[in-house]
Image (cartoon, coloured by chain):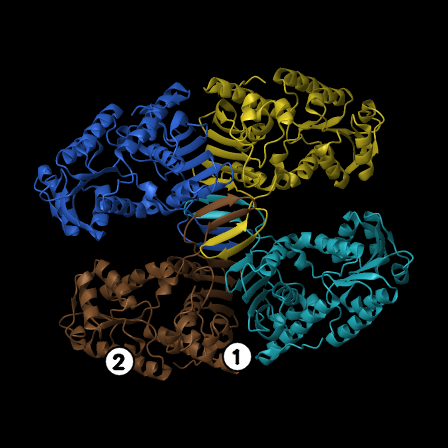
Chain colours: A yellow, B brown, C cyan, D blue
């Protein structure tokens, strides 16, 4: 049994609380939040208790691992705390919005030698993982072209967007990670074209809501990623990998399997209304993989370095949006 | 080159005229119709000429083969003429609405030894033929259950229905043939339940427009066929074969590949508006197979006996509609 | 909060235990099983306790409702106990394999006036329920033809089949219920053709493993149901409803959304390996609907009479298998 | 009736000859080719005759229109000849590989005032045209993102690639045209990343075989086009248009509708083996639209200016491949 503390009791914290409570090999002990009432409520609902202080949540006498789901600006500090306490740690992305600071943090955690994983939950999507397995077993030959689609139904609040770091760092970063993971190849350069089409105020805060990123991977394979903040048809996520001998895809997921035929049309259930309905099962799967690594002593399936690499691509992508040309991806982090 | 006469210049005759004119190994010579103006017009449109008499259309000095697409009540007589003249013959189903008379006709033609084929054109559908190939190569193991769907968009005119012989003999007979052909097994008994739902006048003329037929094949495998005269969504035809190790299907065919997503729905192109759009390519393919058999001396791909067998099933099916019980299929024709 | 006792701690009991434990408005109190160790283990795993006796599980001081998931031969007796104790009751089908005895039991429970529901869980499948909603709102017009497919991957053990009551009563009965529910129409007569194709020993025990049932509903609409005990391709369940103005279907459900294209083929994820993967979410949904009815005082969504009606169809279907003719469905139960 | 001469009797010329011969309002008169035997053979096969000289093919006494399907380097000269003779003209793309020369040619033809159309046949694909219709009627709202896929199964011969002008001018140009046509918007700038992955010799001749183009349209909408010269799974072409209120696509087209299910897999018919099978019906449709414009006096549906515009995008795209940055599209042609 792994004793866990959860840091952060907001929306995503409550999602993780449910996974922690349901996992048979997890002893869900403590919840900490800057809002102690919120911590209390979440802890009670899942048979844990609220930590009396942040320090208590990192007490190795009480817990073996911490799940960091607090606000982005506290990730790095909480990672250091966990490392210093010798605790295993699972952290929401990003490590830190500042890449250099993120890199220092990772170096610190690595020196401590604790198991540390970034929660790139989409890697644990059943279909994406099956696609990765097919690519690994050679089902498409040498990878030549990857296409990823990332489209959310509704623009997040502008207040959120203002502190999000921009579309590349906030949204597309998940797909930079998927591209690296599925191909096993590092991007060399990236070009992004973007526009603010859903709401002109997005442009005012210097961001885009519709973008097309192109990555060139080592060896020449290409990656296309389209990122959209606002669709009129729900949440659309898919991946396609073309190789030298074939193609494989993790397709668009429908919300149901009902179709009606009338006249010259067939009307079917469309896509999931929101991202959460689509990716929900991945959270428990990611936690399960982390716990399994702790139990067996195997390496965690997504290292902090993976978080840094995806972030470095997002940095280059953000630069490209401004410069209008392909930007090299920092290979040193 | 095979010199052809076409008997019958109605709708289906004009379809066959087009195939005859387009086939590179066919010399399309003559068209005969009781309405000589109609024959003239069709012949002219395709570079043939109208026969001066029915006799001329069966003159072995002028033609090698006749395609019988005249009215149902003349099929048998025209088959005998072709046989007596030593001509190869391709005939629209049925051979004759009276099974005994049809059987005598077939015996007569067989004694003459001419190549003679029933135009069960659906056997030449690309997808159905591929399904047959898969079943033959063992892709589903031993056949256990076959499902066929036969649904037309609109009730034919009552005047047509009155002389059609009823839904089993007119519509379902094609699917009785497909069931035999795909499985390679003969039906032992058949049960049909039917209703007149599209138009109460169908019941008044003793027919049904919606029916569910169940065949038991030699060895115990089952066949389900639904036949519908009126859908609100176009023409729907498909076949599914379940066997001991898997299942294969020739699926519902869409009229196009466009889909639009909006809100919670996906709206796609529906089915073909009518049966003709769906089965059109099969006519040329059936003719091609007949001509190819003539050119190579191989047996024709669908014999007159196949027509009789399908008709015998339709007879038993018609009896079952009246008796409410499973009826044996006459094995002797 | 509704206090529940669960009767039966076998496989299906353990499925229901999970739903009971997870439901926010259920206080899962007691588990009873003839094997007290099994009851103990299941209770402990879900925060309930094992009942000291069968009587205790029906004690209205301790519980408000019982969930009967014990062996089939005890359903009727346990229903009576619940009714006599004034407890709400949710029971696995069938009420009793003997239809007359089942009818007496239902009459007894009705006199007691307690809320009582048969767990026809498939009615709570998301897609089937959406299909029902579409039919109810007139999306297909007047129902003319319904097709249901019920195909399991592997023949159950012969020891199970021997006491199952036969394919109609054990397997097809769920689809008899779905047909009634979706159309809102009662079957007047039923015809079934069946064979033992998967294993000859099925014939030796007087049962079939592959069958084609045809129901005629009041008003003339038809229903086709194919029931198969052994496929080579997983679990296949679907429903199609054709009406006077269109058609709607709850389609075949795939286990995943990955496809690979190579050469001339596209290879996709197939169906679910087993029935449980396919229908799992329906158990919690059915329980939820029962609890919701208890909380609001609304009628339960599936009454015991629904269980009797489906069983009466199964009886007629079983007679038809023997007689080879359409059998009337008893309208009096 | 429109009297036609066909210039060019190679592969694509023979495709057009078939369309010309089959069109009811076309009187197919003459075929010219530098290889007179080839012209003779093609003419004979379709009831036309070989022109005695190139001049004869442009003789307004003999023909009303010419179809230019000769080698690329002769297009411009033949266009001028047609214009000077006052003949209507349908020309294979490109007008000339040199954009400035192409522009001069167009200006010359425009001064002559003859109907002149570029054969961008993909605009006449049934599904693409339906997609265009949906976008025009507002089914997706304001266009935000367009994705086009252009993937051929096999690398053309290097000898062909050497004179093709490169992937942008030879292959992607069709999709530049489709993007303009469907959106009704002009591209402002274009970025392309490309690699030679299918064959290293492609790099040696300064070309790419795998590329990702991104266009920014006036107003900010984005277009992604992937162009691939070699797939392991046939010919793949599709278009997707995302707008402010929804999305619509002209989907991947399958070569057939057969699926077999076995174990955990479903194996379906894949894509068309080659581009020709996929686009074949578009040739006759394009010719039909041209002839219809001639008969009714309406403007031709694709003007020479459309050819120039697509070519200007291809020029900018080719520059971007070299510069690694977004290149402006020349707005003046």
Q: Is residue C263 above or below residue B302?
A: above
Q: Position of residue B222 (x, y in %)?
A: 52, 70
First in sequence, mark 2 or 1: give its number: 2
Question: Quick check: D159 left or right of A125?
Answer: left
- Subunit of mark 1? B
Position of C294 relative to D89 (above/below): below
- Tell me residue C193's x, y (percent): 56, 73
Name the chain under label 2.
B
Point out which mark residue B77 bears: 2
* Quarter of the rendering containing residue C211: bottom right
The circle on residue A181 is none
Same subunit under labels 2 and 1? yes
* Mark 2 → mark 1, Cα distance in angstroms: 33 Å
* Disc 2, SS: helix
Residue lying furthest front: D297
Closer to the camera, B85 or B12?
B12
Q: Quadrant of the C terminus of chain A?
A: top right
Between tags 2 and 1, which lies in front? Answer: 2
Depth check: give the residue in front, D245 or D4: D245
* Location of residue C284 with respect to A293 vertically, above or below: below
The crowding category of the residue bearing disc 2, from other C-alpha atoms within 10 Å (few below 14, some 14 to 19, many at least 20), is few
Q: Quadrant of residue D121?
A: top left
Which residue does the image show at 23% across and 62% down from the upper left?
Answer: B20
Residue B326 bears which disc, if any? 1
Q: Are the residues flagged by discs 2 and 1 in contact, CB closer than 8 Å?
A: no
C291 horizontally vs B254: left or right: right
Element under disc 1? loop
Name above or below for residue D200 compared with residue A127.
above
Image x and y of residue B158, in percent:
40, 74
Residue that appears at 48% across and 17% down = A323
Asked whether B77 or B144 is in front, the reply is: B77
């Amino acid at each position: 049994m792994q004793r866990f503390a959860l840091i952060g009791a907001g929306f995503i914290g409550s999602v993780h609380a449910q996974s922690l409570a349901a996992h048979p090999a997890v002893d869900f002990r403590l919840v900490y939040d800057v809002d102690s009432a919120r911590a209390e409520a979440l802890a009670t609902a899942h048979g844990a208790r609220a930590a009396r202080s942040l320090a208590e949540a990192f007490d190795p006498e009480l817990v073996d691992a911490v799940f960091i789901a607090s606000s982005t600006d506290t990730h790095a500090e909480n990672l250091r705390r966990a490392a210093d306490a010798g605790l295993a740690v699972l952290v929401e992305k990003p490590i830190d919005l500042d890449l250099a600071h993120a890199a220092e943090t990772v170096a610190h955690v690595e020196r401590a030698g604790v198991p540390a994983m970034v929660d790139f939950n989409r890697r644990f999507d059943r279909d994406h993982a099956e696609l990765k397995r097919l690519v690994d077993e050679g089902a498409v030959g040498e990878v030549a072209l990857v296409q990823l689609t990332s489209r959310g139904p509704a623009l997040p609040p502008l207040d959120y967007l203002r502190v999000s770091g921009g579309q590349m760092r906030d949204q597309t970063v998940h797909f930079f990670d998927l591209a690296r993971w599925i191909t096993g190849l590092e991007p060399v350069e990236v070009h992004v074209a973007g526009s603010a089409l859903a709401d002109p105020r997005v442009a005012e805060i210097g961001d885009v809501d519709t973008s097309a990123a192109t990555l060139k991977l080592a060896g020449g394979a290409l990656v296309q990623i389209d990122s959209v903040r606002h669709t009129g048809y729900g949440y659309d996520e898919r991946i396609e990998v073309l190789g030298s001998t074939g193609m494989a895809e993790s397709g668009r997921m429908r919300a149901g399997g009902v179709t009606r035929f009338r006249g010259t049309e067939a009307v079917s259930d469309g896509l999931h209304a929101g991202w959460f309905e689509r990716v929900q099962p991945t959270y428990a799967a990611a936690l399960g993989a982390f716990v399994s690594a702790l139990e067996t002593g195997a390496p965690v399936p997504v290292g902090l370095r993976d978080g840094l690499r995806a972030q470095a691509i997002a940095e280059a992508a953000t630069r490209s949006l401004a410069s209008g040309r392909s930007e090299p991806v920092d290979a040193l982090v």
